[in-house]
Amino acid sequence: MKKTIHCPSCGAPLDSTSTHCTYCGTQIKKISTRQQQEARIKELRRAVVGRTPTFDEAMELAKLYTNLGQSAHAEEYLRQAIALNPDAPQPRILLCLSLLGFNRPTTSSRMYADEIREHFNWLYQHHPRMREVEWLGYFLTMEYFMEAQDWRRGLETGRLAVEKFPENYLLQFMYGLALVHFGDTDGLDAQDYRQALHHFRLSAELNPEFEPAMKNASALENYLKG
Ligand SMILES: [Zn+2]
């Protein structure tokens, strides 16, 4: 199995041969050590004492904190970066991804739904063709259908989403959920379960740290074994 590394900007799982992050669009350069990152944070924070950080400083701090798994700190700086330059798409993309829980083993974006929606709407209005905006759009639409328990439209959208973004673990996961009708299991047959299992396994292989995919895959395996 290939080694998983994390995108230094958004924290998404990537394999070690990646040259750019397919989740947030960042080019992957040499990743510095934890000590180097902590030293750089200290240096930057000293530099901004008593004044507002510049856009570049806020972005660098946000990425460093994301990389260290301190997403609350990262989000604080991303919000500052957005306030400093409301026309830049990158801090909005990174904030959406952080609020979606890329640095945590499970996703729970519900608490932040309004904030995510606000930034996504801006992104969709200004940069509808950006790959990052496109996959995020699929994901949020799938979430919406899940909440509405509309598995028919969930299936339709999910199919398109994984066709276009086969390497996205979140979209594979959401499609798996749609295939089991978002838990409304009346009328499902073994073939549906097998198909869902396939997409949960794809999701788990793309991101071995993402627990929900792993858990759903093993629950379905057990079920199918009877
Ligand atoms: Zn990224």
Image (tube, grey):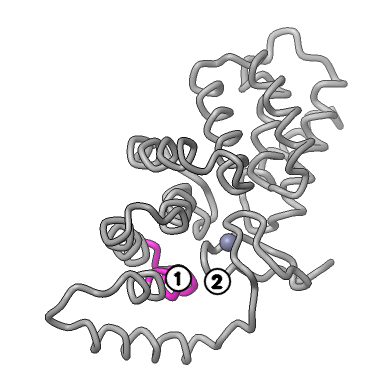
| Residue 221 in sight in this render | no
Which residue is pictured at 86% across the width and 32% down the height?
A: 225
Question: Which corner quadrant of the figure contains ligand 1?
Answer: bottom right
Residue 224 within the segment the image draws in magenta: no
Q: Earlier in the sequence, mark 1 or mark 2?
A: 2
Q: Position of residue 156 (x, y in %)?
A: 71, 20
Q: Residues within 10 Å of mark 1 (few under 14, many from 20)?
A: many
- Three-letter amino acid code at disc 2? Pro
Which residue is pictured at 63% across the width and 70% down the height?
A: 27
| Residue 127 in sight in this render | yes
Q: Position of residue 70 (x, y in %)?
A: 39, 68
Relative vertical location of residue 129 with respect to residue 51 in this rendering, above or below: above
Residue 67 within the segment the image draws in magenta: yes
**Answer yes or no: do the residues labelled 1 and 2 have beta carbons within 8 Å?**
yes
Residue 63's label in the rendered image is 1
Q: Check the image and name the residue furthest to the top.
A: 187
Q: Secondary structure at mark 1?
A: helix
- Three-letter amino acid code at disc 1? Lys
Q: Check the image and name the residue furthest to the left.
A: 50
Quarter of the image for the C terminus: give it. Answer: top right
Looking at the rendering, the stretch of residues picked out in magenta corresponds to: 62-71
Which of 27/199 is in front?
Answer: 27
Ligand 1 closer than 8 Å to label 2 CB: yes
Name the image quarter holding residue 149.
top right
Name the image quarter holding residue 83.
bottom left
Disc 2 marks which residue? 8
Which of 101/157 is in front?
Answer: 157
Which of 93/222 is in front?
Answer: 93
